[in-house]
Image: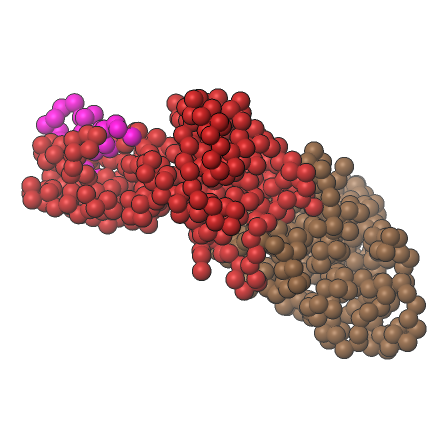
Chain colours: A brown, B red
Amino acid sequence: MFKKEEIESYLKLAISLAEKGRGYTKTNPLVGCVIVKDKKIIATGYHKRYGDIHAEVAAIKKVKDKNLLKGASLFVTLEPCCHYGKTPPCTKAIIESGIKEVYCGIYDPNPIVNKKGVAILKENNIKVYVGFLEAEIKRQNEVYFKYVKEKKPFVIAKVAITLDGKMATLDGDSQWITDERLRKEANRLRCYCDAVLCGINTIIKDNPLLTCRVLKNKKIKKIILDPYLKIEKDFNIFKEDSVIIFYHKEEKRKIKELEKIGVELIRLELKDDFFDWQAILAKLYEKEIASLLIEGGAKTISSALKAKVVDKIFLFYAPKIMGKGLAFANGLHYNLKNLLKIKDFKINCFKEGFIFEGYPVYV
Amino acid sequence: MFKKEEIESYLKLAISLAEKGRGYTKTNPLVGCVIVKDKKIIATGYHKRYGDIHAEVAAIKKVKDKNLLKGASLFVTLEPCCHYGKTPPCTKAIIESGIKEVYCGIYDPNPIVNKKGVAILKENNIKVYVGFLEAEIKRQNEVYFKYVKEKKPFVIAKVAITLDGKMATLDGDSQWITDERLRKEANRLRCYCDAVLCGINTIIKDNPLLTCRVLKNKKIKKIILDPYLKIEKDFNIFKEDSVIIFYHKEEKRKIKELEKIGVELIRLELKDDFFDWQAILAKLYEKEIASLLIEGGAKTISSALKAKVVDKIFLFYAPKIMGKGLAFANGLHYNLKNLLKIKDFKINCFKEGFIFEGYPVYV
């Protein structure tokens, strides 16, 4: 057996490889793999995109001389799968390869795999060790954990604000609070998600494209909350990728018009003039959307925070002060003893501003 | 002559020594000094507190065997002084010591010393080199530069806010937005200044002590803007250290009462129901206050930013969202193209929050 530091060092490499799949794996986890023989790395692999081969198989395939695999050690961030999905089970490939031992970061939380993958390997006389860098790997796969365990998309809220928390002027002008560099990072965040969601007011005000520009060949689903179907079919949003509209009021003519250009429409009830976020998330889960990015505006983001559905929040700060303006959390109201806390926060600094990210703690 | 990297490395040590005087040097600069002989550091010194010996003399004094100083090299962040102030000139001590060469970070901006200190050393056959780590040393002495060159105190504004820029609830409750750890850092910032300023509303609302707790033996002047003399003599503010009140309305009885407990009162005219900041700063310059910290409230800070007198701003962020509340820059109003930019910003992260600091760019 390897020493803990060696195992962690191989798994750290596997984690960084796994990261390369971010934005492409949809409902699948991010997984990285390293194969070691005689203390040398003989192959690496990661899960590149949904439907593609898994990290373990990618690494095994890279070894040309199959004899090298006999007696080798495999390091993988997540428990190998043992079921036929889009591809054959990884356990099969590992067993057939002659690999003698497997180090897994964590068990797969998916009940189809959970502990079963490890059990099959053990039954086939492969030594298996589980439980390394668990916090880091779980965080890397926070989307997958939420999706698989709670059967809901992982919800991220993102706003671009000034130092004094304003996302737009009093006239609603918000283009642009942050500069190009930070907007590129915001687009990267969008690229990492399966779907992006906006309220109809933002769509009407800014007429955005809501496309992915930073990641190549990345398509995204665009979700619009439009209770009274105020949207028009010539809006920019319909130019690329597919659109889903949540609506309430039956506007037969508008519905027909939108369906004709390929828009998917989902009718939901209204509660206090807003949709029930749990109903929205249930519908998006059905559509296999694992990660959802809420981009605005103030009303939509406030309502999502109020409904306690935001799992993670990103605040893109411009190093500027606005004074009077539209505060991003305008629709919320907490007293001093019960402010909405953001835990495990991290700050990413740029010359042009900084990005705050963290996890709301609801009480 | 030493190589540039060696000079910078000695001066970096001198800068870090100089930093130890922060909070105690009043109208004097922060200065650090290192003496090197045969490539070995034989002594170090820094200016500890206003009125005390200067860095160069402190270092020279530490060398017991005075023969060691002959032919030695002296590294000092700021040009040695050449005038009799609270202490004899440093140039005299250097010349008498037998030191052969002096490396200065920057020239002293004070006209009494500027380039004259260097000239005197050169006249006495000491080699002098000037101009190393200039940006860093100027920044370390930004207070001194402002005070000496512009004959005004360096003005710092500080607020504790939530992520959405709120400094108090709608009821004015602000105790506390940030937690103890960040409040300790805020107190450290106060300790670094010569005076702290608050508007009367904050004094009435919070009845603060406004004392220095983090630095030992540090006294601070407390400045209150109280146009209509609403203050009462039993407020906490009068318990420690000295208080200066700027007022407008002649309230003979109150004035007599306050003067009796040792409060200094300065009468100023009002313009649009507020004092002229330039008049306040001129008065504080007369009182030899080199650095002024404005701590609140929203009205006072907004008016100082509006008057373009804030040189540096510190935002202490709690990782929390308030929603509706009192925004710290409430009294300001910029349009999207002309937001108040903060340049050269830095972020200091703690587990309990983060501190943003930077320099407003007025247009």
Q: Is residue B68 rendered magenta in the image?
A: yes
The residue shown at (11%, 42%) is B121
**For the C terminus of chain A, which image quadrant?**
top right
The residue shown at (48%, 21%) is B239
> In the depicted view, which residue is nearer to us: B216 or B340?
B340
Q: Quadrant of residue A248?
A: bottom right
**Residue A99, percent across and down?**
68, 47
B12 with respect to B111 (left or right): right
The residue shown at (39%, 43%) is B281
Q: Quadrant of residue B93?
A: top left
- Give the residue at the far left of this rendering: B124
A122 with respect to B29 (left or right): right
**Residue A295, percent across and down?**
70, 59
Q: Which stretch is magenta?
A: B50-75
The residue shown at (67%, 62%) is A172
In this rendering, the answer to whether B301 lies above or below A213 is above
**For the N terminus of chain A, which image quadrant?**
top right
In this rendering, the answer to whether B258 lies above or below A12 is above
A244 with respect to B201 (left or right): right
**Residue A231, percent across and down?**
80, 71
How many labels, in total? Answer: 0
> In the depicted view, which residue is nearer to us: B40 or B88?
B88
Q: Quadrant of residue A316?
A: bottom right
Q: Is residue B155 rendered magenta in the image?
A: no
A263 with respect to B251 (left or right): right
Q: Is residue A128 visible?
A: no
